[in-house]
Amino acid sequence: MAKVKVFTSKILIIFFFFSTFFAVIPSDVQAAASMYFSPSSKTVTKDTNLVVAIRVNSESTQINFAQANVTYPADKFSFVNVSYTGSKLSLKAEETIKSGSINLGRSLSGGDPKISGDFLFATLTFKAWATGTADLKFASGSIIVEPLSNPPFSRDILNGNWSNGTYTIKAASSTAPGGGSTPAGSTGTTSTSTSTTAKKDSTAPKISGVQVSGIGFNTATISWKTNERATSVLEYGQTKKLVFISFDTKLKTDHKIVIPKNRLTTGTRYNYKISSKDAAGNSASTKQTSFKTKGYSVKLRVLDLAGNPLGGAKITLAPGFDTSVADKNGVALFVGTAPGKHAVTIEIGDQKLAEEITVEEIKDPAKTQEFVLKIAAVAIEQGVDVTSFIPLLALVAIAILVITGGWMGRNYLLSHRRMDGGSGSGDLSPTPKNKPEKPADKETHYVNLDGLSGSSKPANPQATNKPESPNPVGQTIVPRGEKDLLAKNPNKGSDTK
């Protein structure tokens, strides 16, 4: 029992020690950072703009980067633009704008001190297209980053602590003929004078003279005319899904929209369409067409692995799918090329090869960027493709192998037949006269059964000059074949005698 008490007291002492130790260690508590829209709610009228600020609050924690991923209902709002005026984060890390989503990343430049507190991140402008309720929401990937001096060197202090916004879009109030608003339920005034009812305008304006001018590396201006006073609306984007809009609500017949510089990218094709609405609400629009901003000049030289130019090669750059044909020096020129990575497809005859280049954003856009591509291609001369002869060459090689194999097999069989001593009808070569091992059955020996010395008679009468084989006294001479029989059956000699 005493041992149990001692053990229990030791456990309590250890528990008290560790409890005190962890209590005095300062805990690493993250700041209560947040991200929100300002205003978070508002009522706007259809066909008017909604301006919303994205704000960041890091409390007392110093940060150097923030990412805001925003979603919006594309059936209620149309994105107009984003502004960074007044933002404390000076560098653009990401700006990806699609229909229904906006991803913005901002950071400090290398020499800027870290910032903290509540500050402006960016300002968004939308146009309200339809009545109803619309929500602006932050999406996953939104973060506020605190730099650290030790691994992992940074951490997210937002942790999903954001506030979304809800906005109401109402219909525009009706307007009485001649201007002014007519309150609901109003009956107007009675007049004894004769009045005429104005004929309602149901004809849409006619659009003409559409032009794209002032095209630069990130600039363009769209202009057109209408046959009556109307608004000016331009929708545009890099795909057929037009995600940007610029407009002017003033009624006019000469229309001009200058696209903001931060909306266009160098060397990129944009689809667009324009529309105009008159005072009666009749609207007209054009079909989608496109323009391309100015880009960089690129010079590609295509060589084989031996350094020979591949003239006549068809070269395609993607995205954009611009195509050029290399001259006799293997050189192809491209203009209006966007910066960034490009896949290069090279077609030579039936061959199709792929490479990749990176076009840099340089200060002097007029400077040509040069690239040399060495590829493993089969040379083509005078319009003849060497690869077309490969099947014929393969047949010739197979025929040579078959003939060589038959000849070697024939020699192999002949050599083995000679070694076996055969001279059948298949042996095409005569047997040498001085063959080392001549068969012994060409000469027959006769046996003297009385024990006298025997004599040998040649089996071939013409072989008279051969010396007689010696016959030692007392040795029985028998044919070679019978010798083996006598060895197996000793009584055979006595039977023969």
Image: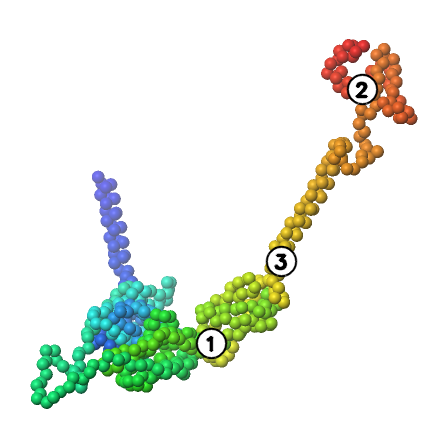
Seen at 10% across and 78% down, the residue is 185
Sequence-first tag of 2 and 1: 1
Q: Secondary structure at mark 3?
A: helix
Instruction: Point out the residue furthest to the right here.
Output: 465
Q: CA distance from mark 3 to mark 2?
A: 70 Å
Callout 2, which amino acid?
Pro
Is 346 on the left or on the right of 285, as rendered?
A: right
Q: Which residue is more in the foreground, 457 or 5?
A: 457
The residue where tag 2 is placed is 479
Seen at 68% across and 49% down, the residue is 400
Q: Which residue is more in the foreground, 65 or 121?
A: 121
Q: Which residue is more in the foreground, 302 or 414?
A: 414
Q: For residue 305, which quarter of the picture? A: bottom right
Residue 108: percent from the left, percent from the top?
36, 74
Residue 442: percent from the left, percent from the top?
82, 25
Residue 292: percent from the left, percent from the top?
42, 76
The residue where tag 1 is placed is 336
Q: Secondary structure at mark 2?
A: loop
Callout 3, which amino acid?
Phe
| Contact flag, marks 2 and 1 (Cβ < 8 Å) | no
The residue where tag 3 is placed is 389
Q: Secondary structure at mark 1?
A: strand
Question: Callout 3: few (<14), some (14-19), or many (20+) C-alpha neighbours within 10 Å?
Answer: few
Callout 1, which amino acid?
Gly
